[in-house]
Image (spheres, grey):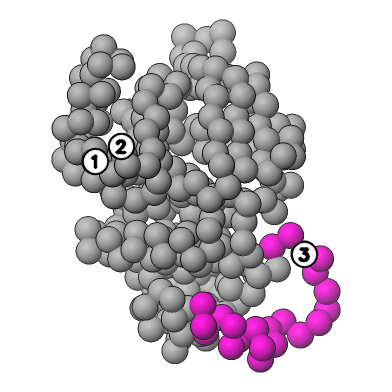
Amino acid sequence: MLELKGIRKTFNAGTVNEKTALDGLSLKLKEGDFVTVIGGNGAGKSTMLNAVAGVFPVDEGTITIDNIDVTRLPEYKRAKYLGRVFQDPMTGTAANMQIEENLALAARRGSRRTLAPGITQKERQMYQEKLKILGLGLEFRMTSKVGLLSGGQRQALTLLMATLKRPQLLLLDEHTAALDPKTAAKVLEVTQRIVDEEHLTTMMITHNMKDAITHGNRLIMMHEGRIIYDVEGEEKKKLKVSDLLQKFEQASGGEFANDRMMLN
């Protein structure tokens, strides 16, 4: 479903601020894989997701989604293949529009716009059923402005919007980092449920090692733009945070440097 081959990306090349963010990165995801991604500060995690999403062109290598080479496709053309949830809960929704209007926009992603009625009764019923999955009572607030929702409610809604039209690939960029622990746990629970029910191929960056171990069927660790550890299945389930720290030190030759991960 996703294949990265020899991806290289350097920012500010030829200047004193030159930084190699991705250094010959290669990765292959099978359909239905739920991969959690961890790594220290500047490891290249978000750069990898941005490269897949087409936020910037890569210097070398190829990116293939569902057997389609998207390496040179701009971000707006890749959008039809992807669902994405960002770290900031305010990013993925339109605050001045109603909940149902936000869902209607998501439902029309990649489709031609027409002058047909904005939201049909059949659509409203479908949105209500989808909102029930979140367990937040939003199915009773369909006409509320999204700006009135809490950060957790908005992030859960963004997740629903990102998966409303089943994407080939779901990208989650630390999507619970800005939430309090209780709300973050709720959003992660909903994430796991939606991914499982829709059998979505998913890549989730997280700063929480326990979450990285608990969720998904595969875990990769990045360092200096490369993957230094890749584990899945039963071996992943048996991991402990101390194991990940030890693996990092063995593979990188240094101590793990990420305050947020250590605190979690």
Mark sitting earlier along the chain (2/3): 3
The quadrant in which the N terminus is found is top right
The quadrant where residue 250 appears = top left
Q: CA distance from mark 2 to mark 3?
A: 42 Å
Classify mark 1: helix, strand or loop: loop
Q: Residue 103, position in %: x, y? A: 58, 73
Q: Secondary structure at mark 2?
A: helix
Residue range (magenta): 109-130
* Residue at 51%, 32% in the rendered image: 48
* Relative vertical location of residue 28 with respect to residue 7 in this rendering, above or below: below
Res. 50 in view: no
Q: Mark 1 near mark 2, Cβ–Cβ under 8 Å? A: yes
Residue 113 counted in the magenta span: yes
Q: CA distance from mark 3 to mark 1?
A: 44 Å
User: Which amino acid is tagged 3?
Assistant: Ser
Residue that numbered label 3 is attached to: 111
Going by the numbered disc 2, the residue's amino acid type is Glu
Secondary structure, mark 3, is loop
Q: Residue furthest front?
A: 234
- Rendered position, 149 above or below 142: above
In the displayed structure, does residue 212 sit left or right of residue 6?
A: left
Q: Which residue is mark 1?
A: 238
Q: Position of residue 29 (x, y in %)?
A: 54, 39
Q: Is residue 154 above or below residue 48?
A: below
Q: Earlier in the sequence, mark 3 or mark 1?
A: 3
